[in-house]
Amino acid sequence: MSRTLEVKVLRQADPHSGSHWETFDVAYEAGMNVTTVMQRIAANPVTADHRDTTPVAYDACCLEEVCGACTMVINDRVRQACSALVDTLLADGAGVIEVRPMTKFPVIRDLVVDRSPMFQSLKRVKAWVRVDGYYDLGSGPRVTRQEQEEAYPLSRCMSCGCCVEACPQFNDHSAFIGPATISQAVLFNSHPTGKVDRDDRLAVLSGVGGIVDCGNSQNCVKVCPKDIPLTDSIAKAGRDTTTYKIRQWFGR
Amino acid sequence: MAKQHVVVIGGGLAGLAVTMRLAEAGIHVYLVSMVPVKRSHSVCAQGGINSVNELTRQQGDNEWLHLDDTVYGGDFLQHQPPVKEMCDWGPRVIHLLDRLGVPFNRTPEGFLDQRRFGGTMFKRTAFAGATTGQQLIYALDEQVRRWEADGLVEKFEYWEFLGPIVDESGHCRGAVVQDMFSMKIRSLAGDALVLATGGCGLIYGRSTMSMICTGGAAGRAFKSGVHYANGEFIQVHPTAIPGTDKLRLMSESARGEGGRVWVPAKPQDTRDPLSIPSDERYYFLEERYPKYGNLVPRDIATREIFDVCVNQGLSVERGALCVYLDVTELSPETHKKLEGILEIYEKFQGVDPRQVPMKIFPAVHYSMGGLWVDYERDGNTGGLVEGSVRNHHSNVPGIFVIGEADYQYHGGNRLGANSLLSCIFTGLFVAPTLENWLKSLPKGGAEDQPVSLFDGAVAVHQSDMDVLIRNQGDENPYKLHEELGELMTRCVTVVRINKELQDCVDKIGEFQERYGRISIADKGEWTNQNFSFTRALGDMLTMARVIAKGALQRDECRGAHFKPEFLIPAPESDEPAELRRQAQTWCDAFKVKNEKWLKSTIAKYTPSGPELSYADVDTSLIPPRPRTYGLKGAEIIEETWRNMTAGGTGDRGGDAVVAPASAS
Ligand code: SF4
Ligand code: SF4
Ligand code: FES
């Protein structure tokens, strides 16, 4: 017998409209994820009470949890739709699948939100290695295995937004730069060439919306799909900004 | 004089590489991408990036051998000068990435670690965990962000390319693009247009490619007159994890690090795989290809897995096709190197591949073919003339193509870990070409062209949109796409048969008629993904026809294009004289086949379907030779072929054959 899933989606036509729930009945398929659910709705955009509607707008790209596009709140947890397997959601006890957009970014339409602030803040902390140029100047600096093993996990941040969604300090009323960006600043400050811009990064992290805004609630690290040690990064950034301020105090 | 601009479409590795190089040269770039560039499909590349390195060099490797592996693996369908240039650039590309902070894996002493990939004997592949593509694109994304902060790059993210703007003289003057949120259509004036728009896997429904890899941009360029070459050469990756929305890649690095492919020798053996003793397992790649083992080139591994499942009925699962890819015997340290891909398996299959052999099956993965581009050969080096305005220039003046979207580097079959190299290399290498192109343009750049040119182009796309969105009919775009995917997967992947291909071409024609009756559920003008997808479906149908027709007409086996009807029978006699005679017959047939088919397929758009023609391939550096991986009588064939061609320098005569002193 074919099973049907009850799927609730919080819809919003555009940035200025209000939102409302719509419910869909979607035929269950073994191994399906929430992205597949959205695709099936698109192919047959009819609500559970048989009203024609429009396909749900959603973001998706890689479908293997490596691009960060498809972040949304599924059954009250922020995560990637592509790696949210229906079987797991059902096993977790929820009879329905409830999907809504992230709350920390402006909604464009339905589940699509504007995460460009995350990319803007990467500019503020100069999240890059300032090399002399792109001509061949030989190999890069020697890096030990241990250093690589510390850098690689931080470098896997896909700007998905889960951490800021979960962070109580990141909201409309605060200028907090957020855990992902802090962690990127730490990553580039630890790079042998990247650290030439260290003080510029620390200046941003010491300023308004910087590290002091973190309330240390540790929500971020719990939701990061890439298991990035965000609270370690935050602690490190805290120490570094302290010494930075002391150095500033003594005028160097 | 008006300011000059370059419009780059696509922000994957190739698009980002050219953007940062242009910005460095002080040239202003509009960078257009359907997704924030950091989310481009390049993130999905897992295994690594190839280059000759200090270690392999001391084991006898050099750039010439990288070239040789690449063209041999590609069954000699590539023009050799661009490939030579790419291989020569390999070490430079790695150096640059290393300086940009890519966290490549390290040896205990702190040097770059390398692994071995398919189709070579050397450990040429540098890697960053098992998410190399992600790490490389992040490094380039960061550099481009730096230039964006400096005002040299203006990004248009969540914007879609609708087509080039071509003036009356046939010159490209920019692009028409659409905001995917507001659906507003506008023009971007550009003195050069660079297409770095990747592959077209969505034509096959599910593949290893991302949702944006529709081939839509290529289709739009094709319709505007850019030629498309070697469309029928589609790589089917041997190892992917079947899924409802996508066939997720299981990187070749799993085999590069020692993973083994096998099936139980007994059909549908229901025992727990780990309890099956090794003498009751069939390690078919190792047995059939003792030299390369599990690391045979991809087209071969794919055909063998297909053969074992489909023809020999040895699939490990009843009712589904799959074989075991086994990494359970590898050390925890090796598992750590493969963490990224093992995690994907675990996450999507719910099974720990460190404990239980993975179940995998081939999936459409890469388009070797692509938009046609030119090059200028350097008679001294055998490579390319750096900065020549012919390099990567399509047949439409002002349109350049790089990355997976062009056709130049991989011939009939791409070697693993050569794609990241070709993407970054082409991006970097085309930059001086673009600089020279901009310098060569007469006064009065794109911005000085009449407004009517730009407004006219926008109006065409606006009216196309209005027509499509209001179209009435009974066809559902998603269902039609599903049918197209099934058709293409059945007819134009691993094994190709003319009767089926003809059927496929006819069906695509029918699909195009049905497309005329398509109906879009969402008629709105705000973030209408339904519409964007449907428009791309039209392009997919156009390109599907190019692929299928190319496959139908090419009556031979070459690389990924396998047509058993035209397989030259392998020598098989046990009697030496007879074997020799059979080998001679084989080589004669091979020579005839090459004379006819060692050609690039060039497709030209016409409203009634693609027109195909065939162009010679530049094999002036390394004479084509039979690709004999695993063939019975390989040695005798090779020997016979050597004797037949002794003294010769290949099919195209001996102009400037450059064999470096260090070549072995
Ligand atoms: S630890 Fe800081 S950054 Fe993380 S969730 Fe808490 S307040 Fe936000
Ligand atoms: S730190 Fe983790 S949760 Fe935050 S954006 Fe990066 S990957 Fe996402
Ligand atoms: S689609 Fe890329 S993370 Fe889900």
Image (tube, coloured by chain):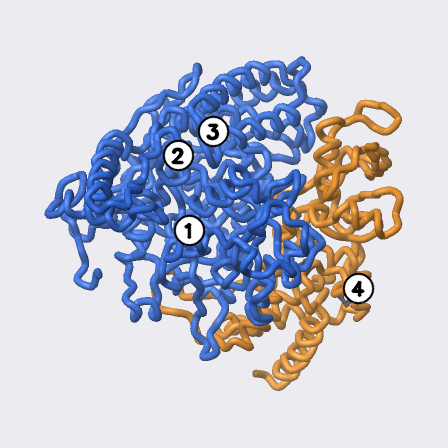
Quarter assignment of residue A221: bottom right
Quarter assignment of residue B333: bottom right
Residue A251 position, x and y percent, is 59, 83
Tag 2 or tag 3, which sits nearer the N-term? 3
- The amino acid sitting under disc 4 is Asn
Q: Is residue B562 left or right of residue B526?
A: left
Q: Chain of mark 4?
A: A
Residues packed near mark 3 inside 10 Å, few (<14), some (14 to 19) or many (20 plus):
many
Between the residue at mark 3 and the residue at mark 2, the CA separation in whole angstroms equals 9 Å
Residue B269 position, x and y percent, is 64, 49
Q: Chain of mark 3?
A: B
Residue behind mark 2: B371
Mark 2: secondary structure: strand
Q: Of the numbered discs in the image, which one, if any, rests on residue B288?
A: 1
Task: Tell me, yes or no, whether dots 4 and 2 are on the same chain.
Answer: no
The shade of chain A is: orange
Q: Is mark 1 within 8 Å of ligand 3?
A: no
Residue behind mark 4: A219
Q: Is residue A69 left or right of residue B419?
A: right
Between the residue at mark 4 and the residue at mark 3, the CA separation in whole angstroms equals 45 Å
Give the chain coloured blue.
B
Residue behind mark 3: B219
Q: How many marks?
A: 4
- The amino acid sitting under disc 2 is Leu
Between the residue at mark 1 and the residue at mark 4, the CA separation in whole angstroms equals 53 Å
